[in-house]
Each structure stands twice: as C-alpha cells, then as structure tokens.
Amino acid sequence: AVRFGDIPLRLIRLAPGGNGKIADAVRVATQNIVVADPRPPTVELELSTDAKVVLPGPAASVELDVKTTTYSGAEVAGASVELTWTLSRGGPGAGPQRPMLVRDDGGGGGGEKVTGIQALPRLPTKTSAKASPLPGRSGHSSGGGEASGKVTVVTADNGRKRVTLSLASLLQDAGKDGSAAAPAEEGDTLSVSARWVGPTREVVTAELQGGGIRVSRSPYSLSIAPSQPVNHKDGTPLPGTPFGLFIDVQSSDGESLHAADVMVTLHEWDGEAPIRKAVDWPVSGGAEDKEKNTSSASLRDEVQRLDLLPITSWGSQVGDICIVKSDGGRSPQCASTLTLPEARKYVVLARST
C-alpha cells in the first residue's frame, strides 16, 4: 500500500571494508518529502491576523485565524493544520540600523535614514547569560539568525480555529540543543506559514498577507535623516553651522503620516554611555512563569513604554527643543535649532506620541 504524508529519505555511504549492512553505513544527508496524489486541490486554506506588530520580550504574541473550506465554500471540520513560525533577526531586507552620530569617529554618510532606537547602547542584562542567542544575535549586532518551530492546530466544526502564538513560551526551547533562545526584540520579524494535507491528500499552503510582522512597541515608526553630509573626515557639519533633518512618521503599512507632532533635541554624548534601560526579560521557567509573563496587561503596558534612560544620565541637551509637524520627509526641518557648538560627538533624539 502507498503511504501518504511526510516520508523521510536518507542518503548513506557504506563504510569501506564493511560487510554491506545498513548498520555499518554513514549517514550523509536526510530530506523529508511529501507523498500525495498529483491532483488539483479541492480545498482552500486561509491564514490571517489583525495584528499590526508583535510586542518585544515576554509580551510577544500574535493571534492567528485559520480557515479550511472546500472550493464550494463548505467548512471543513477537524482539519489538522501545521503552522510554521520563524523569528528572523532584523527582518527581510533590513540592513544594520545605527543611530545618527554627528561627527562620529565612524563617519556616517549624509542622508542616512535612521529608524528607532534599538541600535543605541543599552545597559548590560542578566538575560544574555541565560539565553542561547539566535545565530548572529551577539550583543546588539545584526545578522541573519533566526529561530523557528511548528505548531499543529485542528479546526472546529465551523472550519475555523483561532490560535495564539506566544513567542515568550515558544522561544523557551527554540535555542541550541533545546535551550531557551533570546527573546524577540525590536527590529525582528515574525513570519508564519500554514500547511494542510486535504481530504483527497492534496497539499495546500497559505501565508500571512503582507509577509512578516514587525516586532515593535508601536505600529508607527519615526525616521530621521540629516539634510547634509555627516562625515568626521570631511569635518561636516561644521561647528556653528545649522543643519536640518528630514522627518518621516509612518504607519505599519508604510504610509507617511502628516502633521504628527515630533520633538527633536540635540545632546552631547561620549560615544559609550548607555542610552537605553536594562531590559532583563525572563527566558526560562515553568508553565506558571510562562503564563504570568505573557498574560499580564500591566506587562504589556510596561513593554510598550520607551526604554530610554533619563537624558541627564547620558547626555546634556544642547540648544532649544524643536517641535515640528511631520511632512513625510519632504523638506528639512529644525535647521534653526540644531547647531553643533564644538567638534565632539552628539546624538539627535526625535520623539513622537
């Protein structure tokens, strides 16, 4: 009889001088294949979510809706659907994010766009000592690391199933050798796909519309870019010379928001002082801890707060506060306020609520 479903294949190499038995062979590679009837699908699989972003840390979770129907629209109850989730460091196509350091010893190029504060230095935490980092997630450097796993759900009588993927729990054993992986952080991207072997053994798949979901405290993003070159080798911008910023506030779908209030300030910085709080999110514990870490409304409120340290602890303000309206980055703003008094390191801080 033909066995349908996932079939593991193994490529082996017999040991030299052996007796030809499989037990003496050396495994070279393995691969799973799906055995199914080569027929057109008779069912449809839908995967959707209302989530715009996934919160970082222990509050990282997302609600998904799974729907299984026939082509005629009839619900298919009791369908076993496999969900594959992948947490990617930095997100697809996202390069390293760094703060704009005016007259930094690294020398940034003019016009570089900076979004968020995740690249700014943070106080050390205990988490790194307990968590198995994702590949490429050493410190706050970016890389192509990811963690992934599978969850199986079964649709109800109406052919639907709402499931909550709690990354705080799923990452508990998604690290190396089953250890806890690092919590989801701002800048990561969560991707989810669904797979279902239908009633006639056809394989149907579905993915979230729009691709992955950003890990962020807010569905809105604030970006700034200097209006003139920033390069310490060329000595730009010169002390005493005003410079402006292109400011853009965007929604989760990438649309620019106009007339959003944005406050911009300039601060001295020694290039090393931590700017962000220590966020020592738990990465291990029993079921009780997992439930406590992911279900508390106060925890979600805490995670959504900006983790900026008091400005007085890392950099005194230079000049006045500049309050402007976002314009989609069309024209430079705050040029009358942002002026470097002398040649040293500074941080431009923009905030919007």
Image: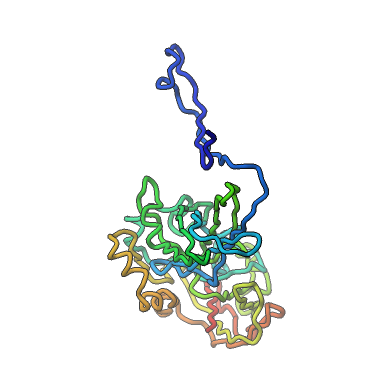
Displayed quadrant of residue 102: bottom right
- Answer above or below: position of 2 versus 136: above
Residue in front for this viewpoint, 195 or 182: 195
Q: Which x, y percent locates residue 105?
A: 55, 62
Q: Which x, y percent locates residue 96?
A: 56, 59
Residue at 58% over, 76% down: 222
- Answer above or below: position of 221 versus 66: below
Residue in front for this viewpoint, 249 or 86: 86
The answer to whether residue 138 is seen in the rendering is: yes
- Answer above or below: position of 43 versus 345: above
In the displayed structure image, the side of residue 182 where residue 188 appears, left or right: right
The answer to whether residue 118 is seen in the rendering is: no
- Answer above or below: position of 59 versus 30: below
Residue in front for this viewpoint, 255 or 73: 73
Kindly give the residue lying farthest to the right in the view shown: 330
Coloration mode:
rainbow
Residue in front for this viewpoint, 318 or 164: 164
Residue at 62% over, 62% down: 233
Count of numbered circles on the image: 0
Q: Which x, y percent locates residue 209?
A: 62, 64
